[in-house]
Image (cartoon, rainbow, N blue to C red):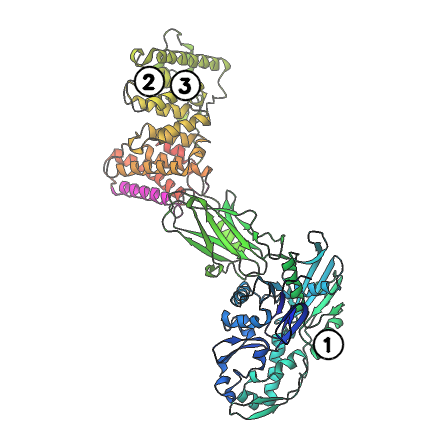
Amino acid sequence: MSLKKAAGLDVNGWLDHVARNWSIDLSGDEQIGDFFVGQAGPLTAVVKTGDGKWIGGKPADLAPHGRGGGWGQVGAPDRRVFVRDLIEGKNDSAQKLASAFTEFARGATNTVLAIEDSGETTEQVQERLLAAMSIARLRNPALVWRTVLSTLFAIAEGLIKTECVVGVISHASCGLSVQKFRIRLEGEKGDVLAPERRSAAKIHAEALGLRQLVSRVREQALSSQRALLETSGVADSKTLPRLAFGLPYQPEIIRRDNGDWEEVKLDAMDSLPSGGIEAASLGLQDCDQIFLETISEGNIRSHLERILEAAGISVTCTLPSDAVARGALVAAQRMGNGDPVYFDFLPRISTIVSGSEGARNFDLVDETETLEAGRVYRSPEPAQLAIPRGYTTTPVYLRKEAELHPRKATIQLTEPLAEATPVSLWVEQKPAAGRARIVMEAPSLGRHFTIDWDQADEDPREWDNIINSLTTPPPSIPERLILKCGMMPWNDAPNSPGMLSLLEQMDDERIDWRQMAQKASSRPNGEYSVSSDGELPSELSPVAVKQLDKLVRQAVSDTEKRLRAGSRHAEQDNAALQFLTWQFRRTPDQVAQWLLDCIENHSGAVGSHPFVWHQANWVLVYQGIARTVNDQATEERILASILKRGIESWNYRAESACVSLLLSRSQTAPLLLSRSDVDKIAERAIFEFRREYETQYTRFNYAPFLVGGLLRWRLKEPWALLVGQDPVADRLAQAIIDARADLLNRWGTDDAFEKKQRKYLPILDDLLAYLTGEGGNPNLLLALYEA
């Protein structure tokens, strides 16, 4: 046995016991190693002495303090508080509760206090008990379920000798607490038997609970001696709890408020409740042994044994009334020696996370895990959440096992976030050690937030209903812009030859690139000769395809000659280049690289590159590369080159058009944008909207197109740019609303303006529908292209 002082406490307020591995002789000397068991109660209390100090234990049992006016000032009711009321929080004073422990365990190196295995032992109750033990200056205090302690007592007494399944029926305040344990061999050498608790105990036979027994006796006593007990106070009678718990009793002398002494004679309970126990409902059929634990004695203990036997439950043995305290001493000694005490499950705690699949449950505490008592559990995988840019608050939904309703906590920030900020949510907890510590950590902010369950708002909805309310489908995304091809541009029209005729008439020595570019860019009946994805009409003959390929090679050769000649000597004619860009993604990759070099190294300059001898040439360069680029790496370089410059320097037909077309036509370009990129493009769109208010909207082409292209960022962030959730979306929506109002207020200006109204108003309505999450025209980007 360890030479460290250890104490086991069963301070429950009904009938308290203490077990220690030391005793104190008459001279006051301590003898470590001696076994001592003490008792106080029943219905223990703490009392206030003359010097204002609160004391508990046996001295409080014997003291007249608080026992009524017959004892003078000492008998004032506020000088006695029942321990049970302190445990339950009816009198919430940790200082008073601490005095109930002090006399029992002063000086112990390790102290274990028993707690009921029932729903009444809430996390708040656990914290209250631990706070009181701390105030009492008990070293290394720990709380352990009394069902566990009963099992440890049985192990120590040799009643359990090997791995097995054990059932415990524990007499609790609210009924019979039924628990089942798997006994495991643990420890460094695998020779220590320890119980594993995998769920909370179930309560049966509420009518047999200790609280109900005391109430039943009190009612019977009041019916026979009401006048006496009401004038002297039920608290004065020690006989009542003795009758309730089957303890020996004899006629009692109590002092009335007027100072007179009077004898009280009470009878045992007329009848005891049956409890209505059924063996199947207890779930102990697979147990190798079953133990009954109760602080009661005599007729109450016998009654419990009889009703269990009548229900067909084979109890191995009924443990002595001090078994829990003695089991607590075993636990304290194991803790002092570093041996495992027991293994416990942790109540499941869940939150809700959202992803591309919508909202879903996320368990912060895995219900399948058990943890050795005294160890700290931390979520092995924290929940990954995010606080959106611009927000100052973020909600966190939580669910706790055994709690009636989920809760919603709101995290408050001091100022709006400049960027969407990832955060992790995790739980830290010890078994039977009060409330879990729920922490939200934001590394990029250098902060963490502790979430208080009690301060969170209760949500009466079912957990699945909350998830479903957050699992609305993500807002829709406009279809990618695909400009189809067809045979109409290839065939002759009444007043102009088609592309087939031009190819047939082609003179290798003298090609009219201007005519070829004009035909390639024409779109009769909404059809190009080559689709924006670089496809050709299926009806086109192989001969015509070869002729087109030859023409493309010639255009590349002529353009390459101009590049080699340099900006000073090259002919100022981009017709061949223009023809190439209208081949869309069928254009050879080197063309996009030429245009990219022009953008990266000569952007804004005039005369330094063969493609640019006039500011208007940049329109072809930017729009041309948007048509021809065919790989993600080049798209990334284009966007980086444009976005590194201030949006105020953009030209609406150059940079704005290029970004609009890239985001609209490409499947990959939207995925390249960061949140800051999106915000920058949105600011340019807002600028272009506001610039056109109260004008003729002559430069409005790409303002709505930018917004339409940005909506495709939802491919990367499904819930992005949603009004009410994203401040940037709010600003975009307001810019659109203002433009719409401006257009409507000027109806009847002239025919040209009315044409613009008819063209843009439906598009603005669709953009608003997308921003508000209501969907919209799936072919919005095509409508924008054709506007």
**Dot in front, 3 or 1:** 1
Left or right: 328 as drawn, with respect to 766: right
Determine whether the residue tagged by mark 1 lies in a helix, strand or loop. Answer: helix
Q: Quadrant of the N terminus?
A: bottom right
Q: What is the distance, in whole Å, between disc 3 and disc 1 at their CAs?
A: 98 Å
**Residue that appears at 60% across and 87% down:** 223
Asked if residue 702 shows in the view, the reply is: yes
Task: Check contact, mark 3 vs mark 1: CB within 8 A.
Answer: no
Number of dots carrying numbers? 3
| Residue highlighted by disc 1 | 302
Q: Amino acid at mark 2?
A: Phe
Residue position for label 3: 591
Magenta residue span: 717-745
As rendered, which of 286 and 540 lies closer to the eye?
286
Q: Which quadrant holds residue 464?
A: bottom right
Instruction: Give residue 329's position: percent from left, percent from top.
Output: 65, 65
Above/below status of 98 relative to 47 = above
Instruction: Name the residue tied to disc 2.
Output: 611
Q: Up-down: is 585 above or below 695?
A: above
The Cα–Cα distance between marks 2 and 3, rounded to whole angstroms, is: 12 Å
Instruction: Nearest to the eye among marks 1 and 2: give it.
Output: 1
The answer to the question of whether label 1 and label 2 lie on touching residues, with beta carbons closer than 8 A, is no
* Residue at image location 70% in from the left, 76% down from the top: 301
Please say whether residue 33 is one of the residues in the magenta stretch: no
Asked whether 1 or 151 is in front, the reply is: 1
Q: Percent x, y for residue 729?
A: 37, 43
Asked if residue 726 is among those painted magenta in the image, a careful observer would answer yes
User: Disc 3 marks which amino acid?
Assistant: Val
Query: Regarding mark 2 in the picture, which secondary structure is present there?
Result: loop
The CA span between labels 1 and 2 is 105 Å
